[in-house]
Structure formats: structure tokens, C-alpha cells
Amino acid sequence: MSKDVSGPRVLVVEDDPVQAFLVREALAGSGFAEIRIASTAREASEQLAAWTPELLVLDLGLPDGDGLAILQFLRSTGATVPILVVTADADPERRVRALELGADDLVTKPFNLLELGVRAQRTLRTHDHLRAADVLAQSLALELAELSEELELNHVVAVEMLVSSLSLRSRAMGTRARRVSRSVHQLAVAVHLDDVAEHLGHAASCHEIGALTLSDRDLEALVRDEPAAGAQCAVASEMILADRHVLAAAAAQFRAPGGSFDRQIQRLSAQLTAVCHTFHAAAQTITFDPAAGVAAVLGAGEHLDLDLAEAFLAVCVPATMPLD
């Protein structure tokens, strides 16, 4: 008949028979039911390969190896078994090294049987708590990633709805928004920002979303790119977009790209949008006139980032085509 084993499993690695007996007694008195003994590093390795204990009690000084090597091997393989080191080693550096290599606790010889049992149980509980905390942290991280993805999707949908509304309000403004968006994407790629080019282009499509709030008269002035209407639109755009899309709100401030921004990516969003808007606002005629757009960029002076303007003229203008 097999023995009923209900307590935690433990492997004791100890070459001294007397010490092994004392450790066994301490563990048995603390509720550990299945206790196996290994007297060498080789025997310990064989036991660990064939059997999974819930606790490892490890002596550092072994006849055929070093307990530190066992610790290092276990942690390098990703093993998660909790480890209680029991040692007579007087070298504090070796004891510290054992803890650095992943030992959960350390008891020095000679030890009190009751204390050793309590420390073993505490090592087991602490490890279980840490493992549970790690599982919880991973679960929360996954949930947060899913929520972030959902929020980002909601932001994208909200922004696209605003751009669609802008197109319904003014076909000219909707067309300009799409042109600026595409050009910002192209310019971002041209200056080696491939990873964020799509996000920057999407944000730039909302640079004048505040036009939704303007009167018909002010909207006509905005289409003509009159400064007063542009300033009014910028304020409205930032207010509408501030809580919906951070980069889009920054793009709405393109008329003052040197302003105060919390992050460099926001300033970049404004600078890219400024270059592309300057071009398209001037080029947007009945026939679409790229030459007028180029002249506007060249004449903008310090208002535009010089490097971005040069990159736009060299790379993006030749690829610029009017949108239907």
C-alpha cells in the first residue's frame, strides 16, 4: 500500500548524515511530508531531473561540487523552486553570493530545529505569494494592454468621425485635411520616422477640426487661410481634441510649432503639420498648384523647421498628387 503524502515535497541536499537527519526532523515537524535526501551534487541533479520538489534545502559545501553552481544552474534554466540555503560556510561573500544567485533565504549551522522548520515554511509561503503576485501582474498587464488597444481604437474612430464631419461641412477643408495627412506621413518616412509615420499622419488629419465650430463666414476665411480665422480654428481644434488624441491636439497648434509641448513627439507633430499645411494651403486652388505651395514653403522663413522644409521639398513634393 502506498504511503499517503499530503504535505509539501522537499529535497534536502546535504552530505553530512547527521545534519541531513536533523534537517529532516525539522521539516517533518513543520508539516513537510515527502522529504528526499541527496548527498552529492550529482545525486541532487538526478533527483531534480526526475522529480519536482516544492522546496529545495541546499548545503553549499558538497563533496563533488559547489552548492552555488547548483543555484546558478537552476536559475539559468528558469526553475522556480524556492531555495533555502543551510550552510556552515563562514565566508560572508559566499552567503551573499548565494542570495544573489536566487536563494530565497539562508540559515547558518548550527541551527535550531524549530527555527529551521519555520524558515522553511516561510520560504515556501513567500515564494507562493510572489508567484501569485507575478501571475496577477501578468494578468493585469494583459488587461491593461487590451484596454489601451480598445481606447486607441475608440480614439481613432472618434477622430475619423470628426474628419468625416469636416468634409461634410466643407469639401475644401476635408480635402485639405486629407492632403496634409498624407504629406505628413510621407515627410515622416522621409526623415526616417517610419515607426510613427502612420500615427503622425493620422493625427495631422485633424489639424483644423475646429472648423466645425466656425460660422460660414469664418469658415470661408479659413479656406483662404486668413490668420484670424486660423487662430480661432486652432483654439477650437485644441479644445475638441485635447482629451481624444494627444498628437492630433498638438498638430492643431501647428501655427506656433515652437510653443510649449509636454513631449518632443508632440512638438514634432506640430512642426510636420506646419510644413505640410503651408504647402497645401497655398497649393489648394481649383487646379491644384504645387508651384504655389513650394513658394509658400520657401517664403515661410523661421515659421517652419528648416530641415523638415528641405526634406519636404526634396522628397515629398515630387510625390504630391491632388486628391479627389
Image (tube, rainbow, N blue to C red):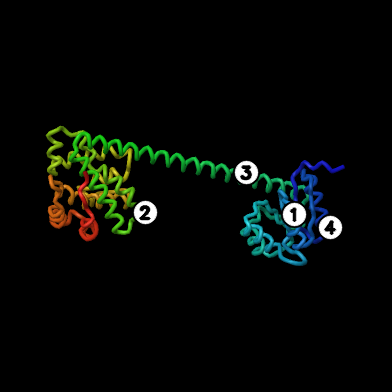
Nearer mark to the viewer, of 1 and 4: 1
Position of 299 relative to 6 (above/below): below
User: Mark 4: which secondary structure?
Assistant: helix
Q: Residue 135 in the image: x percent, y percent?
A: 58, 44
Mark 4 or mark 2, earlier in chain: 4
Callouts 1 and 3 close, C-beta under 8 Å: no
> What residue is pinned by disc 1?
50
135 sits left or right of 298 in the view: right
Q: Quadrant of the rendered structure where residue 33 is?
A: top right
Look at 78% across and 58% down and name the residue there: 38
Contact between labelled residues 4 and 3, with CB atoms less than 8 Å apart: no
Closer to the observer: label 1 or label 3? 1
Judge by depth and name the residue closer to the eye, 216 or 16. 216
Residue 47 falls in which quadrant of the image? bottom right
Residue under label 4: 18
The local secondary structure at tag 1 comes to helix
Q: Amino acid at mark 2?
A: Asp
Which circle's residue, 3 or 4, is located before the other in the chain? 4
Distance in Å between CA atoms under marks 3 and 4: 33 Å
- What number is the disc on residue 195? 2
Label 3: which secondary element: helix
Q: Earlier in the sequence, mark 1 or mark 3?
A: 1
Callout 3 environment at 10 Å: few (<14), some (14 to 19), or many (20+)? Answer: few
Inspect the image, locate mark 3, and give the three-letter code of the amino acid beneath it: His
